[in-house]
Amino acid sequence: MQLQLVLNHEPVSCDVDPCVRLIDLLRDTLGAKGVKEGCGEGECGACTVLIDGNPANSCLVLAAQVEGAQITTVEGLSANGELHPVQQAFAETGAVQCGFCTPGFILSTVALLRRNADPSDDEIKLALAGHLCRCTGYQKIMDAVRRASKLIGSDGPNAQETKP
Amino acid sequence: MNYVRPTGVAELLSHLQEDGSAIICGGTDILVKMRHGLVSPKTLVDVSRLEELRGIAEVDGEIHIGAAVSENDVLSDPIVVERLPLLSDVLKRLAAVEIRSRGSLGGNLVNASPAADSAIPLLLYEARLRLVGPEGDRWLPVHDFFLSPGKTTLARGEFVQTIAVPEPPVGCSGFFHKIGQRRALIIAIASLGALIKVDGSSVRLVRLAAGSVAPTPIRLRAAEEALIEGPLTDARIRDAVKAAARSVSPIDDIRATASYRRQVVGDLLERFLRQTLP
């Protein structure tokens, strides 16, 4: 089928098998290699992307199901050569070790902070509970989300909504 | 494999007549089953955008929830938050936000897991399902919907259109707890939900339901009978816990043993009842 969607603010049109998984469309056809495959069944969160702003496991979505949708991968967060505040916070706090889970954590954090700019620790844990990290022990990730919340707060509410 | 996206109920019904067709909505269960080779449909019929299966509204004092509405949209809907708080609270603990943004309430029911979290509040609220098939519509209490693990009373060619929840009894408090090894994404080892109304010292209304302790999510009627119209004394609590443990039929599996589940469902009930004591 001919599929139209918006990937990282750019309209995309491609000829695709409707039953291919969204993760395969993004990685193999559209080159968004920041989307990682961990478990392939929704347990680990590594393949998380934003579909119309909502975090979803791209391994459990068919390409045809995102027709007309706005998809954001980690590649779409930075703007004008500047890291997104959530990316900046993950880098500054050392919340990245091997990095495989990081794009998923960052995208779910972006979605969390858009609906709740100042989350409690419990709200952060609930929002990120669908992600597994096997390196950090999660403490640095908690630090990163708290720091991102402060960065966004100090830059004003629109700081994270920068578009190229 | 083919993919079709019907634009109306008539078209959906006609696709469901085709050999090897299967409904996909959020995809969070069927795509995992396909990956494990448990199902291999020839045609996936996508109902996720079908208007007739969407929306949440009050209709004649009931709350009607479209079967394709995502679990996240159900739990955050203002009508659900205000009128069906236990459903909202339970869905907050179903899987994880990335699953709930795709998975639908109808899909969680049709999947018919003995551990289905959403079935517990719907059993307690005594919800009904509107099933639509080639012969027409029928309404079925959710209590009669589940047959065994993965099996429902849905006939070939039939689908769930709406989940209708009556106005809950006034003045009830709700409870839900599930036991598992991880806070997110767990398939419950055992779960217990309850609605209760205590008037003075007497239990005026009590409904209990449990997951992962029988081939389907179940109401614990014997334990309810042990509690209704009397005070929450130690002796009556003990009787109810015994009745609950007797009325479940858990199995040993990779997550826990049957005897552990029987113990835990009683413990959850006792915890809830002691918490309810004035």
Image: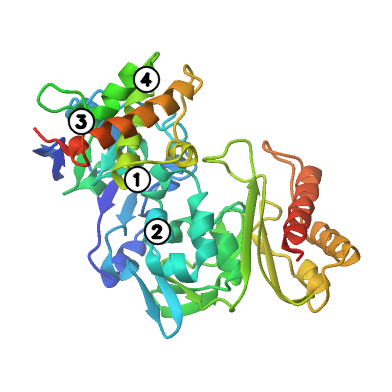
**A121 or A60: nearer the eye?**
A121
- Foreground mark, 4 or 3, reads 3
Q: Is residue A98 above or below residue B172?
A: above
Q: SS for tag 2?
A: helix
Name the residue at the bottom extreme. B60
**Which residue corresponds to mark 2?**
B76
Work out how far the residue at label 2 is from the one at label 1, CA to CA, in angstroms.
14 Å
Q: Which mark is residue A116?
A: 1
- Foreground mark, 2 or 1, reads 1
**Which residue corresponds to mark 4?**
A100
| Chain that bears disc 2 | B
The residue drawn where x is 40% and y is 51% is B103
Disc 3 crowd, CA 10 A, few/some/many (<14, 14-19, 20+): many
**A68 or B230: nearer the eye?**
B230
| Chain that bears disc 1 | A
Kindly check if marks 2 and 1 are in contact, taking CB atoms under 8 A apart as contact: no
Which is nearer the N-term, disc 4 or disc 3?
A: 3
Work out how far the residue at label 1 is from the one at label 4, CA to CA, in angstroms.
26 Å
Q: SS for tag 1?
A: loop
